[in-house]
Amino acid sequence: MGGEGPALSKMGGSDWAAAKGKARKAVRDIAVELVKLYSARMASAGHAFGPDTPWQRELEEAFPFAETPDQLQTIDEVKADMERPIPMDRLISGDVGYGKTEIAVRAAFKAVQDGKQVAMLVPTTLLVKQHLETFAERFAGFPVHLRALSRFQTDKEAKETIDGLERGEVDVVIGTHRILSDQVRFKDLGLVIIDEEQRFGVEHKDQLKKLKTNVDILAMSATPIPRTLEMAVTGIREMSTLATPPEDRHPILTFVGPRSDKQIAAAIRRELLREGQVFFVHNRVSSINRVASELAELVPEARIAVAHGKLTEHQLEQVIVDFWERRFDVLVTTTIIETGIDIANANTLIIDQADKYGLSQLHQIRGRVGRGRERAYAYFLYDAEKPLTETAQDRLETIAANNELGGGMQIALKDLEIRGAGNLLGGEQSGHIAGVGFDLYLRMIGEAVSAFRGDVAEGQTELRLELPVDARIPEDYIESERLRLEAYQKLSTASAPASPDDAVDRVVEELTDRYGELPDAVQQLVAVSRLRRQAQKAGLGEVVAMGDGCGWRRWTRPTRSRFGCSACTRASSSSPPSMPSTCPCPRAHPTPSSSPGSTSC
């Protein structure tokens, strides 16, 4: 469902059909552009990288940690993409600390082995510094020329890097959006890596396209932005997911509630007792020093530092280094720490006015803690005197519910529901998801893209099924609303014509195993699911029961005539040749109806 859920429509009314019609029109327009984009990418000639070299294997064997199964699979997928002549466009989705950087290291090294240059685009100068250290450590002992490009470099250093890229002397450059400026030219660019892709705007993406059209692109994100995520889930971009947490990683205990000085002081003191450190996020530079002073009064024993983007490069770097070296206990900071800060000793996070942040931003900031073996705590606080908007409440509920390891993908999907995918290829951030629901919207896009690509023949996409039977899952059978919806969704998927023949049987087995014998209402629901499947396979567009009669209408037939069930007492003479040999209707067969052209079911 959408952020507020699709508005409920009256049974038999035209509102639902109108909402679907609007969504389908928008989806068709999007599908045309997506297919153009897909076709252009498939038609362009990229560089087919060679197989792994002995140096590549040596680099990978020197990795000091055990790779997770997801990491190994993703690395294989990235390498396979790079070795194809079609330019790679892959999105890697994985929570903070799940090993995305190591995949980037290996992909970059593979590109350099083939004599190609690599550009790594990151959102902050602090992240440039962190990645530079990681890459330098991993590439130590190999002849790879690595440089950084951000505002931390002097003009002389930046000029040397830019000249080196143009001459081909620099193999790998890690930098902010400064890499996208017109003055930066590459001699032979082969791979672009985009870290924390959700942080870059549409204008940056357009500049990136101009950089070079046929280079391989590897994007990484803990919470992919809705537009990017939808392009991945609809098959335009390839996507890999890192879902297995590293060893010894614990979920972050998350609290959402009104701001309380007493609770803030208790949280800071508890962290100090175990000799840890605290991030306190307040995103207004104008009042950040006042907030730091208030915290100093609340917890006089804590050593407090302040960090924000208006500090000079040297001041900011010094504050971060001092905090990393444990000269301070509490860092009062803006969202500048959202990416790039990796301090294992900081395991309590307090966010002031958490209702003012976006969902992916909240998840990213929460990822600054819980990176070591210690249990981490996150407090998302809001002003109790100001009412929360419905969207803000939805965001906070989502962040509180998805605090388990690997929750980034669920948060990204929820973000897609709340905000809508908008224009997949531009800057607009509004969509029709709220009108028809998330699953149906994605199905519409998938069908439209397939139709324009010519993958499927034109035909039925929906079946109208109206039967006077009590087909449902009662609350006394499955108490949890979430689990009931999950069961409905499984039955719906199993009844699709493309599902395996035994798909409905499998769902029945699972329900019986988990919740016991099926009550009558659930048995009716299962029978309706089987009917839906058979009717769709028969090419029917409508199955409607009128009184005691069951009416059939083929999808492609233009008239409103009804057909009798072939297994019933008296079949209509106009019964279509492809009707099922047995009546799949879940009802018994009483006396035939007197309605012309139909029979009882």
Image (cartoon, rainbow, N blue to C red):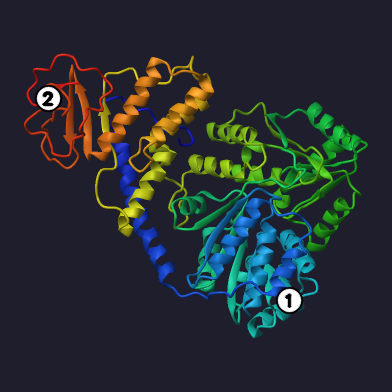
Q: Residue furthest right?
A: 301
The circle on residue 323 is none
> What amino acid is labelled 1 in the image?
Val
* 186 left or right of 432 in image: right
**Quadrant of the image for the C terminus?**
top left
Q: Which mark is residue 598?
A: 2
How many residues crowd around disc 2 within 10 Å: few (fewer than 14), some, or many (20 or more)? many
Q: Position of residue 142 (x, y in %)?
A: 76, 75
Quarter in which the N terminus is drawn: top left
Q: Name the foreground residue: 191 vs 471.
A: 471
Residue 123 location in percent, x, y?
65, 59
Figure check: 425 above or below 157 = above
The spot of residue 513 in percent (x, y) is 52, 24
Q: Does residue 156 appear to the left or right of 181 in the view shown?
A: right
Q: Secondary structure at mark 1?
A: loop
Instruction: Decide if residue 196 is in sight here.
Output: no
Q: Position of residue 401 (x, y in %)?
A: 62, 32
Depicted 585 relative to depicted 288: above or below: above
Q: Specify whether 549 is left or right of 387.
A: left
Q: Quadrant of residue 49?
A: bottom right
Seen at 70% across and 53% down, the residue is 339
Say which residue label 1 marks. 144
Residue at 45% x, 52% y: name it: 428
Residue 277 visible? The answer is yes
Q: Secondary structure at mark 2?
A: loop
Give 218 or 594, whichever is nearer the viewer: 594
